[in-house]
Every structure is written in C-alpha cells, then in structure tokens.
Image (spheres, helix red, strand yellow):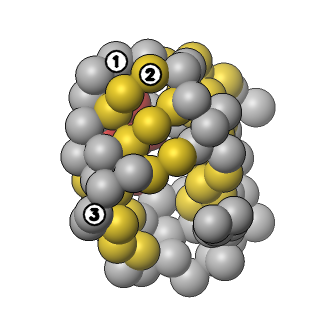
Amino acid sequence: MMHIYFAKAVLATAVVGAVAAGGEVTLLDGDYELTKLDAAVSGRSGALKRLVGSSKAVFHGLDVYANYLYLEGFTVTTKPVNYLRSYDRGLRDQA
C-alpha cells in the first residue's frame, strides 16, 4: 500500500489521483480550502482509496464525485459538503 502524507492549503485532486487503488493519503493537521474530488480519483471495487486525517485537518467545503473512496477522521466546517457518487459506502460521518 502506498501512503502519501499531504499538507497544503489546497488539496489538489492530483494528489489523490496519484495514489493507486488501495492506497492512502494521510492529511496533516491544517486548513484545506474547498476541495473537489472528481471521478478521475476513484478507487475500484475491493480496493478503496483512503483519505484520512485527524479532527485538526479541517476542510472548508468538500465535493466528492468519485467512487470507492474511504473518507475518515477529518473535519468539514462549511458547506458545500456533497457526496454525489459514493457507491462504496466508505464514508463515515461522526457528526
């Protein structure tokens, strides 16, 4: 499994797209502007891509158009929060 640790004001779709299906992106604590994860960053059945972080990794808006993603641990503080194509049930909302 490939792990990428990423911290930047803007989480580029390219970072998640660079991870192979079954890989993981771990967010470092910090603020992330509105981020859009499009269909090009999808994992595949049996090999979810993981985007994880602590509650101190804070998104200020998140649009998910991708499939087979596992999203956990980080905070989303402002709208929009859209999960438009998550067929994988890999979303965990602890709100």
Residue placed most toward the observer, 30 or 6: 30
In percent of width and height, residue 94 lies at: 69, 64
Query: Element type at marker 3?
Result: loop
| N-term-proximal mark, 2 vs 3 | 2
Contact, CB < 8 Å: mark 3 with mark 1? no
Residue 27: which disc?
Answer: none
Mark 1: amino acid: Lys
Q: Is residue 3 left or right of residue 81?
A: right
Mark 3 residue type: Lys
Q: Nearer the viewer, residue 26 or 18?
A: 26
Q: Looking at the image, is mark 2 or mark 1 nearer the viewer?
A: 2
| Residue 66 position within the rendered picture, expressed as x and y whole percent measured from the top left | 41, 66
Where 39 sits versus 73, above or below?
below
Query: Quick one: label 2, few (<14), some, or many (20+) residues within 10 Å?
Result: some
Q: CA distance from mark 2 to mark 1?
A: 8 Å
Q: SS of the residue at dot 1? A: loop
15 or 61, nearer to the observer: 61
Q: Quadrant of the C terminus?
A: bottom right
Disc 1 marks which residue?
8
Q: Which mark is residue 30?
A: 2
* Image quarter of the N terminus: top right
Q: Residue under circle 3?
A: 79
The answer to whether one can see residue 40 in this image is no
Kindly tell me whether residue 80 is visible in this rendering: yes
Q: Residue at x 66, y 24 (%)?
A: 3
| Label 1 crowd (10 A; few <14 / some 14-19 / many >=20) | few
| Residue plotted at (26% across, 29% down) | 10
- Identify the amino acid type marked 2: Gly
Circles 2 and 1 in contact, beta carbons < 8 Å: yes
